[in-house]
Amino acid sequence: METGPEYKTLIEAEQIQRRVREIAGLIENDYGDSIPLFIALLKGAFIFMADLSRHLVIAHEIDFITLFSYGQGARRNSDVGMINHIRSNVRGRDVIIVDEIVDTGHTIAHLVKTLQEHGAASLRTCTLLDKPDAREIEVRLDYVGFRIPDVFVVGYGLDYRERFRNLACIAELTTESRRALNS
Ligand code: IMP
Ligand code: MG
């Protein structure tokens, strides 16, 4: 297993690419007749959304939204807020929420509720990573890339204090390295 000084690779870049292609295939099978609207969460899902979009051969639309459930670092907070409005008209649309990781579930649960209120015709959820052991609220996940243990991960869009988003792999950030980055 490849290791850097600060992190340990959990999922290799090639594995991620293979899985994203598979998820695109599943979505294509499910949405052949409609033009789904993807609503992806910034900042973390920007790379996943870009790769997913490039693999999709069906027509689709993309929008981005910023929510927050964490403060600066890795503090958990069930108080989810929305920073910018949903620009797209979601009424009557087949919406797919795209997140990079579902942890406590509060973020995605909040967005599901909001989009239902906005009148989406159908709503599905898609996440690259799922940490089921960390869940505090039940959410239905329709497309999941990988289930991972309850460890703090970075890379492929995921950050720790805005760092490591550029890693092509998903890596575990050790407690020691987090401590070092904090000091
Ligand atoms: P939830 O509301 O607890 O499900 O948190 C979801 C958000 O928290 C994700 O979209 C990430 O931005 C962030 N998050 C949760 N776990 C991690 C992690 O292991 N690394 C980096 N960010 C994380
Ligand atoms: Mg996020």
Image (spheres, helix red, strand yellow):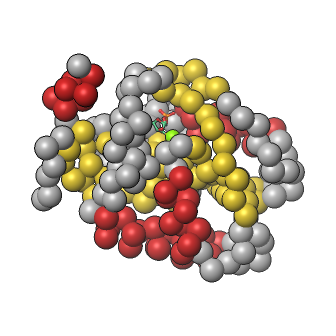
Identified at 84% across, 46% down, the residue is 119
Taking depth in this image into account, of 177 and 99 the one nearest to the observer is 177
Is 17 on the left or on the right of 68, as rendered? Answer: left
Identified at 73% across, 60% down, the residue is 37
Residue 18: x and y, percent? 38, 73
Identified at 47% across, 23% down, the residue is 71
Task: Check the image and report above or below for 166 versus 173.
Answer: below
Quadrant assignment for ligand 1: top left
Residue 115: x and y, percent? 75, 43
Q: Is residue 131 visible?
A: no
Which corner quadrant holds the C terminus?
Answer: top left
Task: Check the image and report above or below for 99 versus 33.
Answer: above
Q: Quadrant of residue 68?
A: top right
Taking depth in this image into account, of 37 and 156 the one nearest to the observer is 156
Q: Is residue 72 visible?
A: yes
Q: Quadrant of residue 42?
A: top right
Residue 8: x and y, percent? 18, 48
Residue 182: x and y, percent? 27, 22
Taking depth in this image into account, of 147 and 41 the one nearest to the observer is 41
Q: Quadrant of residue 67?
A: top right
